[in-house]
């Protein structure tokens, strides 16, 4: 291994978690959580700790056979590897840095318990960092592993007898200082004799002096300055309550420290990137954590026959076979040469992108999202750019949304989601003020649901995940007393907890912002009207984009109430695994609340062939256990459908979106009418937009007399009274309608049906008045594309004075515009007239 330590930024160690002997189920009948899963959950808190004297934890990996791999930052060499002797001034400086780190951990209620000379690292600049300081914390004080943690010569007396607490770190710190001053202690003794000698210190008046005499270092000890002796003796008090605290030690050592802090110039370029970014890019470039551990013989493969037990007892315990191993304290360091080589062609200028500069277009942007997420160079640029934008949030919110339309880097997904949802302010104090511990009536149901929520996920299936999810659910219910707990709320909360496992406040803030935007009033005690409206709109979207399939499902009575409620109540989080939900919600947060309707249609589209060939029972079975869905393709098609559809057709009454200000944009429909119709309604503004762009075919079903008096240019007249209800051929409508509709079908135009409920002169006048009001507004904008829009008769009406009394009737008139896809099948427009079968082709 090379000595060029600048090439090593992180290292890994490995150990085995404890197996559960005998029983595999707990008292509640559920399987016991494996110790490795518990360790993974506990260790997540360590991943966010940042301190100048602590090595940053980068990853905790669970492997086969309960193996755990811990990846963390590494610098320089350990005190054990350092051969040179330190001066007393240097010892004070080293001690101060160690005390600072331990004081920081103790304030977070984290006890080191494994402090030793091999996990204290020091670099050439004299900076000290503690490595693997979370071993005791992640293993729950050693309860989740089968081996003792720590090195015996650093154990305090109470650690040997009862486990000890934070004051045990003070004793270990005193032993470290004593070794730095006089030399290594008890070098030739085995663990047993060392432990006995430590226990005999309880009768010593001065433990430090007694230790020095036992190791033949007393003469050297007498040469130690009194100020250092005083600190060491304060640490090596027999009774834990008499020992100094690290806060006191930091204060005293700060006064004694004479070495000035050397300001290290920040490294620029690749090595100046955040460690988590470096580790992520290194993995994308082909870095393999386990390969280096195997290379250093820290992972050894043995034939399975050697691990088989000799006998299995009735209680499930085994005799012989694989035996628990002690903790191997060696580490494997990882070189970044692979990553440097992969990104060697990147210019220094690209490491510091400026917002006003035009950025180059990357070839990888055309690839599927799952491939882009594994492309090292592409992710490098995306990470740098998003980090830049996130530092400017909330002022850069618009830029973040624009970039999120392309994709979101997985490493920053939690931060980007929070920005897209508008999360800002002092969310931590707001979350802390909520009482999440007092029992509530919903606790019992929450306790039943949580152990079934995404239990394949290592973070959510452990005890730590269960506790965090329960706190989030209780906090949300207490903050929103108008809502009740519905099954599925746990699945809805899970993605936010998964991305913000160590930041519950942000997970809660995201959930608090997400529900009003996408699931407004869905969690009311009586949410039947909200869900019925949502399902009716979904069914209309299916009829608009997949008319043949919607017709088939309608004929076999396979209605959305039978399969789609879990989809929308949980925004598909109850249907798909988390890795698919993350991609789906990436698009959801960017496109807005209408996208889930089209997501549902996208799912049906992928199952189209199977559904068309299935009956009612087969469809029920299919919906209860969905086959594999290509979520990338589903999201892509859903976005295309959402953007290409008139916005007004997805209008819902029960939504939290801003109220419509322009009358021409309003499409309020009585709920009874909405439930009875299959085709969606369209607003006047969307209708005119389609006509201006020549993207629709207008069918006017008023009488010939009214049509000849005034009509929309390019429309065709198919009087409802002249349609033969028994005929299902397109030519039954007449030669011109047949030709126009057929051409519209080929061009995939939208078909808009215009009608009046009561074809009287008064309603016709209101109808024309409605057009004239909108046209007068359009003309005030001086849009040249409106010229020649209406026929001459209608232009004459526009030039006439409009009676203000007629304007309130515009809302009623607007109801008479219905819209549907140009490739409709029979039955989709039967509320107006039966469409011939030829359309289905």
Image (cartoon, rainbow, N blue to C red):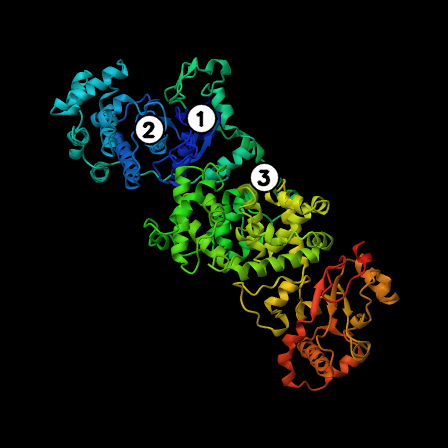
The answer to whether any part of residue 575 appears in the image is yes
Query: How many dots with numbers?
Result: 3
Cα distance in 3D space between marks 2 and 1: 15 Å
- Looking at the image, residue 589 sits to the left or right of residue 147; the answer is right
Across and down, in percent, residue 780 comes to 67, 78
Q: Nearer the viewer, residue 137 or 284?
A: 137
- Which residue extends farthest right? 735
N-terminal-most mark, 3 or 2: 2
Q: Is 194 placed above or below 337 here?
A: above
The image shows residue 498 at horizontal and vertical percentages of 47, 43
Residue 781 locus on image (x, y percent): 67, 75
The kind of secondary structure element at disc 1 is: strand
Label annotation for residue 377: 3
Which residue lies under the disc numbered 1? 67
Query: Residue 814 sits in which quadrant?
Result: bottom right
The kind of secondary structure element at disc 2 is: loop
Residues at discs 2 and 1 in contact (Cβ within 8 Å): no
Question: Helix or strand or loop: what does disc 3 sit on?
Answer: helix
Badge 1: residue crowd in 10 Å (few <14, some 14–19, many ≥20): some
At which x and y percent is residue 550?
70, 54
Please name which of the two marks, 3 or 1, marks the residue nearer to the observer.
1
Identify the disc placed on residue 248: none
378 above or below 566?
above
Tag 1 or tag 2, which sits nearer the N-term? Answer: 1
Distance between mark 3 and mark 2 Cα atoms:
41 Å
What residue does disc 2 label?
142
Mark yes or no: residue 422 visible. Answer: no
- In the image, 199 versus 516, the foreground residue is 516
Label 3 or label 2, whichever lies nearer to me, is: 2
């Amino acid at each position: 291994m090379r000595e060029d330590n600048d090439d090593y930024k992180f290292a890994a160690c490995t150990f085995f978690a404890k197996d559960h002997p005998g029983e595999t189920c707990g008292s509640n009948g559920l399987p016991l959580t494996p110790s490795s899963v518990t360790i993974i959950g506990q260790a997540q808190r360590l991943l966010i700790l940042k301190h100048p004297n602590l090595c940053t934890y980068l990853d905790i990996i669970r492997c086969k056979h309960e193996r755990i791999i811990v990846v963390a930052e590494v610098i320089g060499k350990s005190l054990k590897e350092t051969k040179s002797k330190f001066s007393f001034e240097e010892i004070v400086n080293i001690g101060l840095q160690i005390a600072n780190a331990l004081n920081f951990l103790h304030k977070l209620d984290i006890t080191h318990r494994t402090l030793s000379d091999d996990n204290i690292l020091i670099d050439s600049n004299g900076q000290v960092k503690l490595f693997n300081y979370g071993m005791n914390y992640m293993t729950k004080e050693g309860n989740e592993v089968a081996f003792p943690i720590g090195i015996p010569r650093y154990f305090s007396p109470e650690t040997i007898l009862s486990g000890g607490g934070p004051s045990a770190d003070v004793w270990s710190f005193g032993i470290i200082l004593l070794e730095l001053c006089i030399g290594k202690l008890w070098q030739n003794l085995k663990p047993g004799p060392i432990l006995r000698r430590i226990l005999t210190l309880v009768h010593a008046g001065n433990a430090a002096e007694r230790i020095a005499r036992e190791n033949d270092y007393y003469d050297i000890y007498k040469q130690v300055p009194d100020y250092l002796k005083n600190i060491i003796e304060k640490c090596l008090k027999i009774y834990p309550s008499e020992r100094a605290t690290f806060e006191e030690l930091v204060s005293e050592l700060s006064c004694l420290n004479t070495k000035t802090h050397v300001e290290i110039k920040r490294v620029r370029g690749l090595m100046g990137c955040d460690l988590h970014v470096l580790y992520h890019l290194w993995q994308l470039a082909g870095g393999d954590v386990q390969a280096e551990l195997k290379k250093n013989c820290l992972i050894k493969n043995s034939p399975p026959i050697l691990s088989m037990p000799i006998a299995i007892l009735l209680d499930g315990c085994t005799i012989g076979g694989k035996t628990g191993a002690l903790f191997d304290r060696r580490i494997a360091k990882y070189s970044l040469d692979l990553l440097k080589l992969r990104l060697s062609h990147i210019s220094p200028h690209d490491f510091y992108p400026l917002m006003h500069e035009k950025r180059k277009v990357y070839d990888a942007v055309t690839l599927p999202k799952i491939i882009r997420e594994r492309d090292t160079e592409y992710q490098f640029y995306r990470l740098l750019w998003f980090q830049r934008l996130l530092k400017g949030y909330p002022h850069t919110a618009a830029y973040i949304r624009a970039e999120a339309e392309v994709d979101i880097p997985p490493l920053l997904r939690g931060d980007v989601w929070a920005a897209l949802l508008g999360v800002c302010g002092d969310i931590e104090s707001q979350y802390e003020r909520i009482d999440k511990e007092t029992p509530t009536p919903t606790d019992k149901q929450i306790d039943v649901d949580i152990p079934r929520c995404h239990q394949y996920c290592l973070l959510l299936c452990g005890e730590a995940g269960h506790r965090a999810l329960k706190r989030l659910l209780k906090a949300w219910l207490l903050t929103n007393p108008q809502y009740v707990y519905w099954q599925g709320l746990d699945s809805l909360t899970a993605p936010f907890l998964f991305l913000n496992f160590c930041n519950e406040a942000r997970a809660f803030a995201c959930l608090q912002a997400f529900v009003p935007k996408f699931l407004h009033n869905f969690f009311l005690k009586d949410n039947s009207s909200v869900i019925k409206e949502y399902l009716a709109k979904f069914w209309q979207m299916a009829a608009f984009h997949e008319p043949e399939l919607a017709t088939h499902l309608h004929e076999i009575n396979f209605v959305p109430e039978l399969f789609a409620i879990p989809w929308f109540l949980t925004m598909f989080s109850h249907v798909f695994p988390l890795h698919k939900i993350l991609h789906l919600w990436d698009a959801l947060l960017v496109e807005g609340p209408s996208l889930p309707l089209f997501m549902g249609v996208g799912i049906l589209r992928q199952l189209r062939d199977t559904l068309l060939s299935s009956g009612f029972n087969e469809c029920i079975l299919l919906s209860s256990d969905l086959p594999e869905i290509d979520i990338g393709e589903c999201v892509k098609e859903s976005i295309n459908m959402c953007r290409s559809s008139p916005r007004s057709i997805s209008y819902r009454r029960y939504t939290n979106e801003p109220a419509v200000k322009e009358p021409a944009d309003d499409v309020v429909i009585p709920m009874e009418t909405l439930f009875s119709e299959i085709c969606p309604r369209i607003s006047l503004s969307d209708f005119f937009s389609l006509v201006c762009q020549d993207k629709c075919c207008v069918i006017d079903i008023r009488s010939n007399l009214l049509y000849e008096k005034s009509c929309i240019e390019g429309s065709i007249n198919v009087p409802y009274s002249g349609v033969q209800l028994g005929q299902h051929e397109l030519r039954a409508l007449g030669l011109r309608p047949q030709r126009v509709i057929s051409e519209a079908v080929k061009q995939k135009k939208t078909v808009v049906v215009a009608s009046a409920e009561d074809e009287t002169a008064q309603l016709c006048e209101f109808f024309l008045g409605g057009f004239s009001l909108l046209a007068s507004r359009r003309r005030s904008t001086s849009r040249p594309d409106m010229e020649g829009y209406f026929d001459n008769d209608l232009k004459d009406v526009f030039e006439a004075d409009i009676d203000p009394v007629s304007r309130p009737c515009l809302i009623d008139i607007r109801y008479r515009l219905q819209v549907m896809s140009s490739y409709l099948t029979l039955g989709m427009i039967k509320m107006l007239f039966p469409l011939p079968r030829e359309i289905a082709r």
